[in-house]
C-alpha cells in the first residue's frame, strides 16, 4: 500500500518537473505568440500579397505592351522561280528578321477599369479577411489557454482530494488499531482512496494534452516546457454598455460585415466586366519597327538590309460568341444576388451572436458567484466533519460525504471560472469591442 502511494505521488509530481528552461505563458503572451507564429494567421496575411498581385495584373491591361522579336533562318535549299527553262534563285543562304512592337490599349469597353476596381476591392477584402482571422486567432489562443488552465485546476482539485483521503485513511487506520472502528470502515477508506487514482491519472494526461494543444496553436514546439500564469482579477465583472450599443458597434465594426459588402461590390463590377465582352468595341494602337536582312556569308551591307516602320489602329467589335458572354453575365448577376443575401444573413448572424454572447456572460457571472459561495460552505463542512470524526462523535460516512461535496464544489468553481473567462472572450470576439 505504501509502495503504491509512493509511486503514484511520483507520477503527480513528475507533471511539474522540468528538464530545462520553461517559458511563462500569460493570456496576453498567448495572444501575442499566436499572432506572430500561428500558421493559419500567417497564411491569411499572405492573401494580402496575392491581392496586390491581382492589382498589378489588372493595371497591366491599361498599360502598353512592348515586345522584341527576332528570327534567323538558314536556307538549306535556296528557293527559286522558273522562267521557261531558266531557274532563278530568289533567296540567300541566311535570313535575319528583327521587330520591335508597341501596343497601347485605347478603349476596352470599360473592362480594364472594372478589373482594376475589382482588384482593389479584393485587396480591401483581403485586409478584412485578415482582421477576421486575427479575431478568431485571439479567441482561439484565449480558449486554449483557459482550457489548459481548467485542466490544471481540475488536477489540483483531485490532488487535494487525494491528500484528504490519504489523511482520512491514516486516521481510520489509527482508530482501527485502537478498536474504535470496524474493518468495513477501514476497507471503505482504502477503496475510496484507490478509486480516485484512475481519475488522477486521467487528469494528469489531460493537462499534458491541453498544454500540447496550446503550444501547437501558438506555434511553439511541442517539446517546449511552459508554465501557465493567470491573474485572478480577470474574473471581476466588467462594466458593459447596453446590449443595443454592443449590437450596433458589432454591425459597424465586424470584419465579416465589411467583407460581405465588398464581396457584393466585387460581383457588381464583375457583371460590368463580362458585359464588356459583347458589342463593346476594343480599340488598340500599334506601331512596329522592323529590320530584315539576308546574305550568304553573314556580311551585311547596305543593300542586304531593309528597314520598315508602321503604325496601326486596331478595332474589334465582338458580335457573336455563341452565347458565352450571356452565360457569364447571368452567372455574375447570380453571384451578386447571392452576395446580397449573404450580407443580409451576416447582419442577422452577428446580431444573434452578440446577444447570445452577452447572455452567456451574464449567466456565467451568476454561476461564478454561486460557486464561490458554495465553495466556502463546502470547506466549512469538511472542517466540521473532520473535527467530529477525530473527536469520536462523527462517522466516516460524514467525512466521505463532505469530501465528495467539497471536490464537486471545487470542480464546479473551476468550471465556472473557465466559463466566465471564455464567455468574456466570446463577447469581445462577437462585438469587436475591446474591454
Image: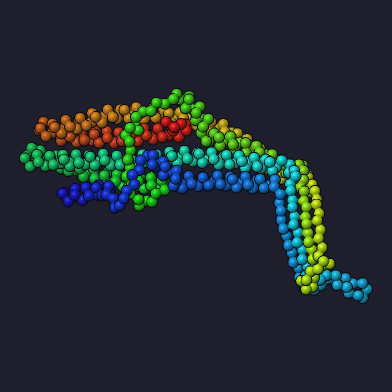
Q: Position of residue 216 (x, y in %)?
A: 40, 48
Q: How many circles with numbers are drawn on the protein?
A: 0
Q: Residue furthest left?
A: 178
User: Foreground residue, 342 or 172?
Assistant: 342
Image quarter for residue 81?
Answer: bottom right
Colouring scheme applied when the structure was drawn: rainbow
- Residue lying at 78% horizontally and 57% vertically, measured from the top left: 289
- Residue lying at 77% horizontally and 51% vertically, measured from the top left: 286
- Residue lying at 32% horizontally and 40% vertically, measured from the top left: 229
Q: Position of residue 6 (x, y in %)?
A: 19, 49
Q: Is residue 350 visible?
A: yes
User: Foreground residue, 347 or 173?
Assistant: 347
Image quarter for residue 191?
Answer: top left
Q: Is residue 329 left or right of residue 304?
A: left
Q: Is residue 143 visible?
A: no
- Decide: is 308 above or below 303: above
Q: Residue furthest front?
A: 302
Q: Is residue 269 left or right of residue 181?
A: right
Q: Position of residue 107 (x, y in %)?
A: 75, 43
- Decide: is 370 above or below 17: above
Quadrant in which the C terminus appears: top left
Q: Position of residue 326 (x, y in %)?
A: 71, 42
- Decide: is 135 above or below 60: above
Image quarter for residue 188?
Answer: top left
Q: Residue furthest bottom?
A: 85
- Residue lying at 57% horizontally and 39% vertically, measured from the top left: 124
Amino acid at each position: 500500500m505504501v509502495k503504491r502511494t509512493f509511486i503514484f505521488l511520483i507520477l503527480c509530481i513528475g507533471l511539474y518537473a522540468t528538464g530545462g528552461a520553461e517559458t511563462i505563458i500569460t493570456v496576453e503572451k498567448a495572444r501575442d505568440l499566436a499572432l506572430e507564429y500561428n500558421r493559419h494567421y500567417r497564411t491569411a496575411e499572405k492573401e494580402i500579397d496575392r491581392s496586390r498581385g491581382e492589382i498589378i495584373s489588372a493595371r497591366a491591361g491599361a498599360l502598353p505592351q512592348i515586345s522584341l522579336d527576332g528570327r534567323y533562318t538558314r536556307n538549306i535549299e535556296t528557293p527559286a522561280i522558273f522562267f521557261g527553262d531558266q531557274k532563278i534563285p530568289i533567296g540567300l543562304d541566311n535570313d535575319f528578321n528583327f521587330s520591335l512592337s508597341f501596343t497601347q490599349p485605347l478603349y476596352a469597353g470599360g473592362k480594364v477599369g472594372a478589373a482594376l476596381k475589382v482588384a482593389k476591392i479584393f485587396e480591401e477584402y483581403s485586409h478584412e479577411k485578415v482582421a477576421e482571422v486575427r479575431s478568431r486567432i485571439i479567441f482561439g489562443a484565449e480558449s486554449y489557454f483557459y482550457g489548459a488552465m481548467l485542466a490544471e485546476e481540475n488536477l489540483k482539485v483531485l490532488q487535494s482530494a487525494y491528500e484528504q483521503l490519504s489523511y482520512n485513511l491514516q486516521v481510520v487506520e489509527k482508530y482501527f488499531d485502537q478498536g474504535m472502528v470496524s474493518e468495513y470502515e477501514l476497507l471503505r477508506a482504502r477503496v475510496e482512496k484507490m478509486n480516485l487514482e484512475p481519475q488522477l491519472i486521467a487528469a494528469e494526461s489531460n493537462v499534458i494534452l491541453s498544454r500540447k494543444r496550446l503550444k501547437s496553436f501558438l506555434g511553439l514546439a511541442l517539446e517546449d516546457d511552459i508554465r501557465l500564469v493567470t491573474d485572478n482579477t480577470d474574473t471581476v465583472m466588467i462594466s458593459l454598455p447596453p446590449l443595443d450599443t454592443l449590437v450596433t458597434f458589432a454591425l459597424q465594426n465586424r470584419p465579416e460585415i465589411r467583407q460581405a459588402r465588398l464581396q457584393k461590390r466585387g460581383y457588381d463590377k464583375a457583371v460590368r466586366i463580362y458585359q464588356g465582352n459583347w458589342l463593346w468595341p476594343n480599340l488598340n494602337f500599334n506601331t512596329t519597327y522592323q529590320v530584315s536582312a539576308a546574305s550568304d556569308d553573314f556580311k551585311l551591307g547596305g543593300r542586304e538590309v531593309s528597314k520598315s516602320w508602321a503604325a496601326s489602329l486596331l478595332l474589334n467589335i465582338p458580335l457573336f460568341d455563341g452565347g458565352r458572354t450571356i452565360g457569364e453575365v447571368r452567372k455574375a448577376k447570380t453571384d451578386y444576388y447571392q452576395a446580397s443575401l449573404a450580407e443580409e444573413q451576416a447582419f442577422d448572424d452577428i446580431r444573434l451572436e452578440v446577444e447570445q454572447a452577452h447572455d452567456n456572460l451574464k449567466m456565467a457571472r451568476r454561476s461564478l458567484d454561486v460557486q464561490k459561495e458554495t465553495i466556502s460552505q463546502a470547506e466549512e463542512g469538511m472542517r466540521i466533519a473532520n473535527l467530529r470524526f477525530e473527536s469520536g462523535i462523527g462517522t466516516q460516512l460524514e467525512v466521505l460525504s463532505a469530501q465528495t461535496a467539497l471536490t464537486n464544489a471545487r470542480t464546479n468553481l473551476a468550471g465556472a471560472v473557465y466559463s466566465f473567462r471564455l464567455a468574456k472572450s466570446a463577447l469581445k470576439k462577437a462585438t469587436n469591442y475591446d474591454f
